[in-house]
Image (spheres, rainbow, N blue to C red):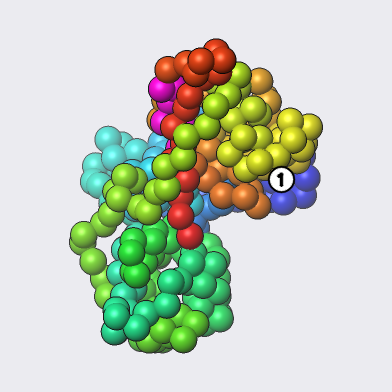
Amino acid sequence: MNAEEEQMKKRLRELAERSYRGNCYTFTDFLSLAELSCYYEMERELSFAGEMVSGGSEGRERCMIRFGNPGELGYEQDFPIVCLRIRPLMKKFAEDLTHRDFLGALMNLGIERGTLGDIILQEKEAFLFCKEIIAPYIMENLTRVRHTSVLCEVTEEIPGKGEAELKDINIQIASERIDGVIAKVYKLSRSDSAALFLQKRIFVNGRQCENNSHMLKDGDQISVRGYGRFIYAGGRGLSKKGKLNALIQIYGG
């Protein structure tokens, strides 16, 4: 265990104990997949406090953890998460902006990464999950992304997992082993794909995966740090040469 993982686990214990002893809810920042993996490793240890994970809507990658049991506390408290819609003032002249463009513009405002959740791209717009406390600052100060003037506003129309921009591709694989699928999707050699597992860069449904022979199931979400993420949408029959035809849905941006 490295120092960052140890520090994260210490922080999670502190929040769980504060919730349990103080009879109140406590929340983490938005956590990365690697940080969430620390939580999943100690999920049983922290269960005494009661916990829940949310990123603002279903299928989110960056999430917050809430400690506190509604049954024992006697009340419910929502996650302090809002969704901001970031849209161009003049859609006709807007650039084709990427996830990196939106994130870079936000980071240039001096905002801490832990206050920001997922960014979902949809046509020329983006939907940003963020901490409620930072939303007014973003709405006031994020006026431009690259050369495109934008407007930010709180929205209740939160896009679901299926509404993000997904690109369908068809691949042929020998089996549903995760290393072979990743190699095919990102055009890597089998050895390069296997190395990603040793580097702890593979996550399946939000949990770190170090087993390169793990068999994928329909609907699994795979994140590969440094490459992107995709949904394994399952097999679509066999080819004439006996290979499995599979549908992959790659997240855009």
**Residue at (45% x, 80% y) in the render:** 145
Q: Residue at x 43, y 72 (%)?
A: 96
At label 1, counting other C-alpha atoms closer than 10 Å, the crowd grade (few under 14, some 14-19, many 20 or more) is few
Residue 16: x percent and y percent? 50, 44
Quarter in which the N terminus is drawn: top right
Q: Looking at this view, is 84 or 247 the one in front?
A: 247
Task: Give how far across and how far down residue 193 sits, in percent.
Answer: 71, 35
- 176 is higher (above) or lower (below) than 250: above
From the viewer's perspective, is 204 left or right of 227? Answer: left
Closer to the camera in the image, 19 or 142 = 142
Across and down, in percent, residue 37 comes to 59, 39
Q: Is residue 235 magenta?
A: yes
Q: What residue type is labelled 1?
A: Glu
In the displayed structure image, the side of residue 211 where residue 246 appears, left or right: left
- Judging by the rendered image, the residue that carries numbered circle 1 is 6
Residue 112 lies, with reference to residue 252, above or below; the image says below
Q: Position of residue 126 (x, y in %)?
A: 36, 66
Specify whether residue 132 is in view.
no
- Image quarter of residue 39: top right
Please tell me which residue is depicted at 52% across the width and 45% down the height of the picture: 229
Point out the stretch of residues depicted in magenta: 231-236
